[in-house]
Image (spheres, helix red, strand yellow):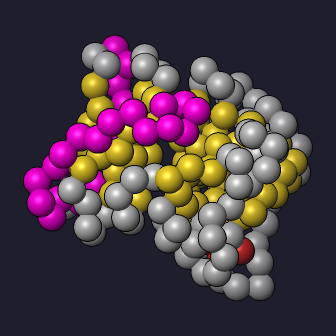
Amino acid sequence: LDVPSTSLAPAMSDLLYDATNSAMWFAENSDNKLYKINVATGAVDTSLVIGGQGYFNSSQALARDSADNAIWALNASDDTVTKINAATGAYYNGTLVASTFAAGSPDPSAIAYDSTNDRIWIGHDITSIALTVLNSDGTSAFTVPLQSGDQVDSLYYDAADDAIFAAGL
């Protein structure tokens, strides 16, 4: 695949294969965009602005929502998540503002989709004291307290055991 880049040094922060839509999604911090690439042709099908403006404001992590056929992009510096329609590549609720939701505590760094309960789990870096859990409509479901100072670098949801695993420092 020919991965697009900008005049700034490319800073790909996450990559996600979407078998349902035959696409490869990636977030590039240097131009604040999320790209959807057609796996069959290698062409860019979609390029969307996400998150705040400026370097390192765009997505830090991606998750696939199988129930809604959506991609969730975690926007690190403005503490939000954006929901994208995976089939069309458009903002899920029509606009960036309507499709972007609060990610809970500051410094979100990891995201996972809970297919059993149709929820989004969000881990936080540096100042984290909880995991944030959102319903698939972006509303807050609950939080899970962590030890003071814990940071979450990666999340994995295990549907077989209905369990979330967090890795970090």
Depth order, front residue of 133/168: 133
Image point (31%, 19%), residue name:
162
Q: Give coordinates of residue 117: x percent, y percent.
A: 43, 19
Residue ranking furthest to the left: 147
Left or right of 138 in this view: 91: right
Q: Which residues are magenta?
A: 135-160
Image point (63%, 64%), residue name:
51
Left or right of 126 in this view: 106: right
Above or below 24: residue 79: below
Depth order, front residue of 94/32: 94
Image point (70%, 85%), residue name:
8
Quadrant in which residue 161 is drawn = top left
Q: Is residue 132 visible?
A: yes
On the rendered image, what quadrant is the C terminus found in? bottom left
Q: Give coordinates of residue 46: x percent, y percent.
A: 84, 51
Q: Give coordinates of residue 23: x percent, y percent.
A: 74, 39
Give yes or no for residue 145 being in the magenta stretch: yes
Q: Give coordinates of residue 101: x percent, y percent.
A: 56, 49
Give yes or no for residue 19 being in the magenta stretch: no
Depth order, front residue of 59/142: 142
Above or below 61: residue 66: above
Number of marks in the image? 0
Quadrant in which residue 88 is drawn = top right
Above or below 146: residue 137: above
Above or below 66: residue 168: below
Residue ranking furthest to the bottom: 8
Q: Is residue 35 visible?
A: no
